[in-house]
Amino acid sequence: MRVALSKSENELLKSIYRQGRDNGRVHTGVLADLLGVAPGTITAVVKRLAERNLLDHNPYRGVELTQAGRRAAVAVMRRHRIVERFLSDMLGYAWNEADRLAGSFEHHLPQEVEDRLYVALDRPASCPHGFPIPPPDVAEIPEMPPLYSLEPGDVATIAVPGSTDASVVEFLGAMGLRPSVRVEVKEKHPFDGPLVLEVDGHMRTVSEKVARQIFVKTEELFEERI
Amino acid sequence: MRVALSKSENELLKSIYRQGRDNGRVHTGVLADLLGVAPGTITAVVKRLAERNLLDHNPYRGVELTQAGRRAAVAVMRRHRIVERFLSDMLGYAWNEADRLAGSFEHHLPQEVEDRLYVALDRPASCPHGFPIPPPDVAEIPEMPPLYSLEPGDVATIAVPGSTDASVVEFLGAMGLRPSVRVEVKEKHPFDGPLVLEVDGHMRTVSEKVARQIFVKTEELFEERI
DNA sequence: ATCTCCTTTTTGATGGCTCAAAACCAGGGT
DNA sequence: ACCCTGGTTTTGAGCCATCAAAAAGGAGAT
Ligand SMILES: [Mn+2]
Ligand SMILES: [Mn+2]
Ligand SMILES: [Mn+2]
Ligand SMILES: [Mn+2]
């Protein structure tokens, strides 16, 4: 990995990593949709990344990150989350704005500065959304299951989606579903019904749709990081 | 000025601004040397900037910034100095490292973040080197004469060069010539001889060569900013 | 008025980023 | 087995950044 990866290469790695966690193989089409660019653009970037052995490209049937590719992708996510933390902790941005603003300039931050920033921020364990900041040089980030996958009795810590519009933010705020908040599942209604949660001493009901877009750190995972 | 200027365009504007303060017209050759690129590269960038009416290009005889060009150049310098302040105040970098590290990622910082950073840094009046941070949208920065232009009896505030190697930093430190330090010129030896200064209660002698690379904010300029 | 030399611009390449449209192919349907 | 079709890759194009080398121009010297 001689010369630094470009912005598009970084963003593509990130998307493939996220998309490929369960699937394994990821199709270029979904990446084009995800990143909002033309299909041919993805193919071009994929070729460069394959050249660098960060992924395997099976023409017409998808791509898959190599070990080195996963490491690079996780490094991008780490950097993104550190920059978000900077934006929220030092500049006072709300968590829904941090993601948007980190987006572009994170890719031009020298590694050296990233490292100092991490220390200056007091080695934060998670980004403003509640997602973990991985250690440097690892190839995996612990899986965060959706809130909806929990069962009654389960206790977990909330992580909310990165870029969200104001109305969603307001709704989540009203429910007390802020990053890093502890929740306990009280009831789960059948047939994709809503979830009843205890949040901060209050009983809250959230639809299946919402509960699929919120992610959680379960007790076991929580213990692991102590 | 629809779309944002690129890194090379920004750096070129900055160089032309500095070079053209007295000269007026700046030759592409000196810009090529200054930025360490091939002459043809400058011509290419110059053409784009001329297209945007940020400068006038007189083929074969030089370029000159327009009013809009000077405003853009000063904006670049403002941003650079704010980022330097961030690196020194928030991340603890020494002033000779701040310039180097600001260099690349400053050009990708969203305006919005620059503004917040400025506020978070408590609206600093100068960069870590002692150069003033201009207000937004002005087309000029007050001229900082070299220390060597002062006469015995003059009092001024020091600004030190941005990127300097460790030995120079060490020497200046030993002389007490740190950014924002007050000095009084005691003697000026004839025939380009050295300068004798009072710095922090100590008498210091600096060569003409050094005194030409250090810049000062004189009393009048100092009063202006109060 | 010419010539010569040094500087500047132009040209031709390469590589990144991106798009629209054309060519291509894998897998499902017939 | 064959064909369709929709997704994928290629192609052709434009913009930015940059270089080396060729062409062009300015300005002083003859
Ligand atoms: Mn990004
Ligand atoms: Mn985040
Ligand atoms: Mn710069
Ligand atoms: Mn500075």
Image: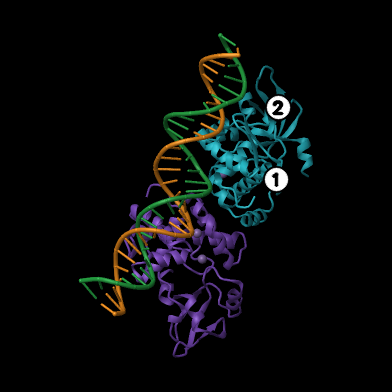
Chain colours: A cyan, B purple, C green, D orange
Q: Is residue A189 visible?
A: yes
First in sequence, mark 1 or 2: give its number.
1
Residue depicted at x 68% and y 33%: A21
Residue B37 coordinates in the image, percent (x, y): 47, 61
Q: State the SS at label 2.
A: helix
> Which mark is on residue A134?
1
Q: Which sits in the foreground, D22 or A98?
A: D22
Instruction: Name the quadrant containing residue B24.
Output: bottom left
Is B23 situated left or right of A24 in this image?
Answer: left
Q: Is residue B44 above or below residue B170?
A: above
Q: Chain of mark 1?
A: A
What number of labels is visible?
2
Residue B195 coordinates in the image, percent (x, y): 49, 86
Q: State the SS at label 1.
A: loop
Residue depicted at x 67% and y 40%: A131
Amino acid type at image mark 2:
Ser
Q: Quadrant of the C terminus of chain A?
A: top right
Q: Residues within 10 Å of mark 1 (few under 14, many from 20)?
A: many
Residue at numbered disc 2:
A149
> Which mark is on residue A198?
none
Is A48 situated left or right of A156 in this image?
Answer: left
Residue depicted at x 67% and y 24%: A195
Q: Chain of mark 2?
A: A
- Do discs 1 and 2 share a chain? yes
Q: Is residue A36 visible?
A: no
Q: Going by the picture, which residue comes out furthest to the bottom?
A: B190
Residue D25 coordinates in the image, percent (x, y): 29, 63
Instruction: Name the quadrant containing residue C5.
Output: bottom left
Contact check, label 1 and label 2, Cβ < 8 Å: no
Amino acid type at image mark 1:
Pro
Q: Is residue B176 above or below residue A17?
A: below
Q: Residues within 10 Å of mark 2 (few under 14, many from 20)?
A: few
